Amino acid sequence: MAMAGLAVQIYNAGGFCRVVSTKPMPGTQWIRALTNVGCRVEVCIENKTILSVEDIISLIGSRCDGVIGQLTEDWGETLFATLKKAGGHAYSNMAVGYNNVDVEAATRHGIAVGNTPGVLTETTAELAAALTLSAARRVVEADDFMRAGKYEGWLPSLFVGNLLKGQTLGIIGAGRIGTAYARMMIEGFKMNVIYYDLFQSTRLENFVTAYGEFLKTQGEAPVYWQRATSPEEVLKEADVISLHPILDKTTYHLINKERLSLMKKDAVLVNASRGPVIDETALVEHLKANPMFRAGLDVFEDEPFMKPGLAELPNVVVVPHIASASKWTREGMATLAALNVAGKVKGYPVWSNPNNIAPFLDEHSQPPAACPSIVNAKALGLTVSDGSAQQKL
Ligand SMILES: NC(=O)c1ccc[n+]([C@@H]2O[C@H](COP(=O)([O-])OP(=O)(O)OC[C@H]3O[C@@H](n4cnc5c(N)ncnc54)[C@H](O)[C@@H]3O)[C@@H](O)[C@H]2O)c1
């Protein structure tokens, strides 16, 4: 069916309230999450990768209770004012990051903003690990070489890369994903870790200490952690640096020309956070000037584009923003986004621990009567629940 010029698919046409999803999302659990509580669901199936603000205004129409949107969309004053006028009070990003959302504007219009934490953590960390290994061991370059029929036999210096075992891992942004990635690299490759975050990560520190003790009991060298007081300290010390902060004013171009120059000439830099955390033009120049320096990138400053010159460089591995692309995670993200909107439509409280969202993902039981994660819950004065008791934020 074509609605306001854009093709939509409708579920539960007679539902008492109207929820729009700007994209088809994986799985069907998310659709049931909405139809089970009486929503009519309209999914935009227009063959257009990124919807404009005008497209979304037409999807919202004159009556809309809530929207599920994507990180490629510009959710600012215009869209929240439009949603409010249409009677809406809930929006959820199908993403944990929400730098595409003007949360203050949403709050001004009384609209709850949901995100989907927890369910992306391991999947995103695994892709960061994949990029690290690919860059350090030159996997993509070697694959290209092989397919081009250039392999004539084993040679002592063919595609020599970096050993990770016992090297120093640098983490900038040791939140959920940064910590999960650090654990993988520490357990897998016995790396020592130096991290920089605005907050202490006792979870990471305690893990490294305990794992170091365990290694000693096995007669192996322990691993160590260090909390840096500046990003510079991490960049100077580490052999592999992976970026996992949120994107905001404090992390925009966190990696710039000056900071790149502090890094070891054969360091590996990985970014699976957001593109603008790196000044990509400066990175292109740095990669050109330092052929032993390698990078693994999932995200780009001007997506879907790469800065001129990046694609031609052999010492960078590039993938199209697929860090959260495992079936389990993408279906889980869709379910959490739908439950954020469904919960708000039903007037449910907000779940007290967005880091423990497992109860919302079990297909075989009813999800808790709560919104899994609303980022402006406090600003809106919403009630919070741990499944048993409720309290006002
Ligand atoms: N590439 C992808 O597909 C993908 C998938 C998931 C998440 N992400 C990105 O990863 C980010 C992190 O996700 P998360 O779930 O780990 O979030 P999180 O909130 O658990 O962790 C973010 C960490 O960054 C830290 N931080 C904030 N400002 C900082 C600064 N100036 N310097 C250093 N650290 C700073 C925070 O203190 C926090 O510990 C998301 O915001 C999102 O943008 C990308």
Image (cartoon, helix red, strand yellow):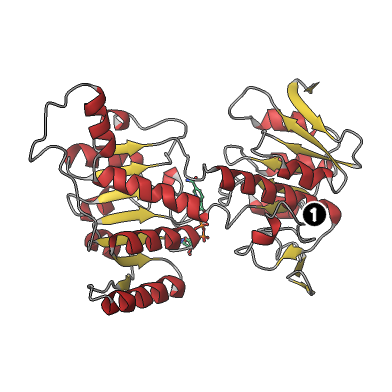
Which residue type carries mark 1?
Lys
Mark 1 CB in 8 Å range of ligand 1?
no
Q: Is residue 35 above or below residue 169?
A: above
In the picture as drawn, the residue positioned furthest to the left comes out as 156
Q: Position of residue 145 (x, y in %)?
A: 21, 28
All told, the count of numbered labels is: 1
Q: Which quadrant of the view contains residue 5?
A: top right
Image quadrant holding the N terminus, namely top right
Q: Is residue 137 above or below residue 378?
A: above
Q: Give the secondary structure at mark 1.
A: helix
Image quadrant holding the C terminus, namely bottom right
In the picture as drawn, the residue positioned furthest to the front comes out as 218
Q: Residue at x 90, y 39 (%)?
A: 15
Estimate how packed mark 1 is, as few (under 14), some (14 to 19) or many (20 or more) residues with alpha carbons within 10 Å: many
Q: Nearer the viewer, residue 87 or 70?
A: 70
Q: Which quadrant of the view contains residue 309?
A: top left
Q: Is residue 285 above or below residue 116?
A: above
Q: Is residue 334 visible?
A: yes
Q: Is residue 247 visible?
A: no
Q: Residue at x 43, y 41 (%)?
A: 299
Q: Residue at x 22, y 73 (%)?
A: 221
Q: Position of residue 22 (x, y in %)?
A: 69, 34
Q: Is residue 81 left or right of residue 101?
A: right
Residue topped by disc 1: 344
Q: Residue at x 64, y 30 (%)?
A: 52
Q: Position of residue 357 (x, y in %)?
A: 64, 60
Q: Nearer the viewer, residue 95 or 332?
A: 332
